[in-house]
Image (spheres, helix red, strand yellow):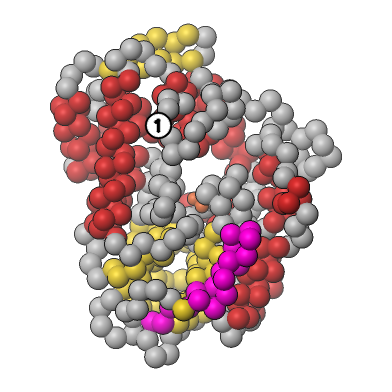
């Protein structure tokens, strides 16, 4: 399979708008379509995929630009930058629609929208696309609650707010509306999921069954994250659409590190993947190399977390250490991604008995290590990752 696709349209200064064609054989093609999403929501522009199968399938949808402007900056307690405020409210929608036309299709041709996972940057534009196309939406059942609940962001916020406090992270002061923008709880952020994906193997959506696309459940970034393996018409080569499970050049943020490391292990055993097409950033040509890098990345963060906790440390103290997170973190500013990154490593070390809570000061929790050599803790972590059957009740 040709590894690099054919560029049909280049990215605009927004970092989005690109359309790339990949041939799956003489009859079928797959297109990568990049649409606008600012860095404040995950890692920037999103990649959607249009697959010519027995049905026309759109994988992920991106996020509407008006929602980004009206809601996400405000929720993060940040002013909307002037260049984003100046963008049209339907910018990403127009990017996607014109890209679909460029591939020779029309939005009304789309039969199914398959979601790689239940994060806003990947499904919110689906609300408009469904109205235009009548397409049916499919997502893994473990993420369907996130997608179909119109208050899911509010729910996440309410669940995590005390957690952020326990981490020692400064909270945004004004995340609730004060600028005549819609209140968080008044915005419907849901998308109806028509079909639940409940198993691996050939993609089934209602009566439709694909002979060339199969599902691999890859949890960890979110509980119901899936990868789609798309077979070429002839031979055994496959493209992998991995959502946010694998990214390049940035590293994905796991929601659950145990599940994520297990997913990496599972993906390692997949054969005939010649190209990985992620939901953000660049394609991954060397899957095994990327998997090894991501495993090492988390191993090093586990080690760093363990070692710095020789003295009691809060999660926010860990997250704001120089070089701990991918980008510098301002200790005075709310940064849920940075906090969560430290939290998941602390959680796994706790699970393996390498860290314990030394004390709670105010509402902030401090952790201290067991004093063992890290290699001993690491071998217990490896056991947790490798032996799901005997460690499954550890986290109940
Ligand atoms: Fe994402
Ligand atoms: Fe995501």
Between residues 196 and 343, which one lies in front from this camera angle? 343
Q: Is residue 13 a member of the stretch shown in magenta? A: yes
Q: Where does the C terminus fall, quadrant-wise? A: top left
Locate residue 232 relative to residue 186 in the image: left or right: left
Q: Name the quadrant containing residue 22.
A: bottom left
User: From this viewpoint, which residue is outermost toward the front?
Assistant: 13
Q: Where does the N terminus fall, quadrant-wise? A: bottom left
The magenta-colored residue range is 7-24
Q: Name the quadrant containing residue 392.
A: top left
In this view, 252 is above or below 123: above
- Whole-percent x, y for residue 130 in the image: 64, 68
Between residues 363 and 104, which one lies in front from this camera angle? 104
Q: Is residue 167 visible?
A: yes
User: Of helix, strand and loop, which one carries label 1?
Assistant: loop
Between residues 103 and 331, which one lies in front from this camera angle? 331
* Residue for point 26% across, 56% down: 289
- Whole-percent x, y for residue 339 in the image: 48, 30
Q: Name the quadrant containing residue 25.
A: bottom left
- Whole-percent x, y for residue 215 in the image: 36, 65
The residue beneath circle 1 is 324
- Whole-percent x, y for residue 152 in the image: 60, 44
* Residue for point 62% across, 51% down: 38
Q: Is residue 174 a member of the stretch shown in magenta? A: no
Locate residue 328 relative to residue 240 in the image: left or right: right
In this view, 260 is above or below 201: above
Locate residue 129 relative to residue 210 in the image: left or right: right
Between residues 285 and 173, which one lies in front from this camera angle? 285
């Amino acid at each position: 399979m040709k590894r690099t696709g054919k560029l049909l349209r280049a990215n605009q200064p927004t970092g989005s708008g690109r359309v790339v064609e990949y041939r799956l054989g003489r009859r079928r093609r797959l297109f990568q379509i990049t649409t606008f999403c600012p860095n404040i929501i995950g890692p920037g522009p999103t990649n959607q995929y249009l697959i010519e199968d027995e049905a026309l399938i759109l994988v992920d949808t991106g996020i509407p630009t008006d929602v980004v402007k009206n809601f996400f900056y405000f929720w993060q307690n940040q002013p909307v930058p002037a260049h984003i405020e100046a963008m049209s409210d339907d910018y990403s929608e127009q990017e996607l629609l014109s890209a679909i036309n460029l591939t020779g299709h029309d939005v009304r041709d789309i039969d199914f929208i398959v979601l790689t996972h239940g994060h806003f940057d990947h499904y919110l534009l689906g609300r408009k696309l469904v109205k235009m196309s009548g397409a049916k939406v499919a997502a893994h059942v473990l993420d369907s609650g996130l997608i179909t609940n119109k208050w899911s962001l509010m729910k996440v916020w309410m669940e995590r707010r005390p957690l952020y406090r326990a981490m020692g992270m400064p909270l945004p002061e004004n995340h609730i509306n004060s600028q005549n923008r819609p209140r968080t709880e008044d915005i419907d952020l849901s998308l109806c999921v028509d079909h639940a994906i409940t198993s691996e193997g050939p993609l089934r959506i209602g009566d439709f069954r694909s002979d060339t696309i199969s599902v691999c459940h890859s949890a960890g970034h979110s509980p119901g994250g899936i990868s789609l393996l798309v077979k070429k018409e002839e031979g055994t080569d496959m493209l992998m659409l991995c959502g946010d499970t694998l990214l390049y050049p940035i590293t994905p943020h796991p929601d659950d590190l145990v599940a994520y490391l297990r997913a990496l292990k599972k993906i390692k055993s997949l054969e005939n993947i010649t190209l990985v097409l992620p939901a953000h950033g660049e394609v991954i040509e060397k899957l095994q190399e990327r998997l090894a890098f991501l495993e090492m990345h988390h191993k090093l963060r586990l080690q760093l977390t363990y070692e710095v906790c020789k003295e009691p440390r809060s999660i926010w103290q860990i997250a704001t250490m120089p070089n701990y997170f991918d980008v510098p973190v301002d200790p005075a500013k709310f940064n849920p991604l940075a906090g969560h990154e430290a939290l998941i490593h602390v959680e796994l070390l706790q699970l393996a008995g390498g860290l314990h809570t030394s004390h709670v000061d105010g509402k902030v929790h401090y952790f201290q290590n067991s004093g063992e050599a890290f290699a001993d803790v690491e071998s217990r972590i490896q056991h947790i990752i490798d032996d799901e059957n005997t460690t499954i009740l550890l986290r109940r």
